[in-house]
Amino acid sequence: SPTPARNWTPWACPVPWVAAVQGVCYAGGLEAALTCDFIYAERDARFALTECRLGLMPGTLGTQTLPRAVGERRAKELILSARPFSADEAHAWGMVNELCEPGTVLARATEAAQRIAANAPLAVRQAKKSIHTGLQTDLHTAYRFELEAWYRLLDTEDRREGIAAFVEKRAPRFKGR
């Protein structure tokens, strides 16, 4: 039987994943990108979930992740028609975080990853988990989850270091503790 999604998806990983898309990103490639936390794409990139054209359907979370990224109605249109769409459309719909000039997408995605990596690792992990978990439930339950995650960070070395660095006007040296 297939491996349950929670065991292999980037959102189950505490470290954020960043996709850098160049050229054509169809079918399984798009499904893989959609499981990432961020998508950076070159302006001339093309996207599609083409499986229905082949007598199949997306089978690697495409029917779950695309609607969450672009909305149910648009996702149905794109999946059921197998219509390719542009990076500009993907950006306008909120699926792509940033459009990049050709040849720059990997550098821009790496810069985003470095900005995240410069932050406290425990805080980044807790925030990522809180966002993902919260979106799967009602607002009240999500807020309770967020507060529990926030309280877990209060007694960490990283929180103390972050406050000290802010007060001393220096860059923090986080250790993930």
Image: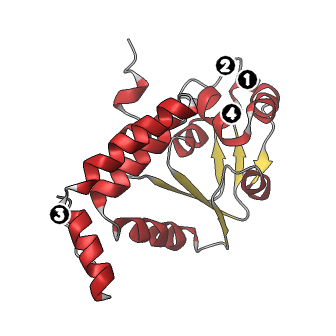
Q: Which residue is mark 4?
A: 67
Element marked by disc 3: helix
Residue type, label 4:
Pro
Q: Position of residue 75 (x, y in %)?
A: 75, 33
Image quadrant containing the N terminus: top left
Q: Quadrant of residue 11?
A: top left
Mark toward the viewer: 2 or 4:
4
Residue type, label 1:
Cys
> In front: 34, or 93?
93
Q: CA distance from mark 2 to mark 1?
A: 5 Å
Q: Which residue is mark 2?
A: 56
Q: Which residue is mark 3?
A: 157
The mark found on residue 3 in the picture is none
Mark before the other along the chain sequence, 3 or 4: 4
Mark before the other along the chain sequence, 3 or 1: 1
Q: CA distance from mark 3 to mark 2?
A: 50 Å
> In front: 34, or 121?
121
Label 4 environment density (alpha carbons within 10 Å; few <14, some 14–19, many ≥20): some
Mark toward the viewer: 3 or 4:
3
Mark toward the viewer: 1 or 4:
4
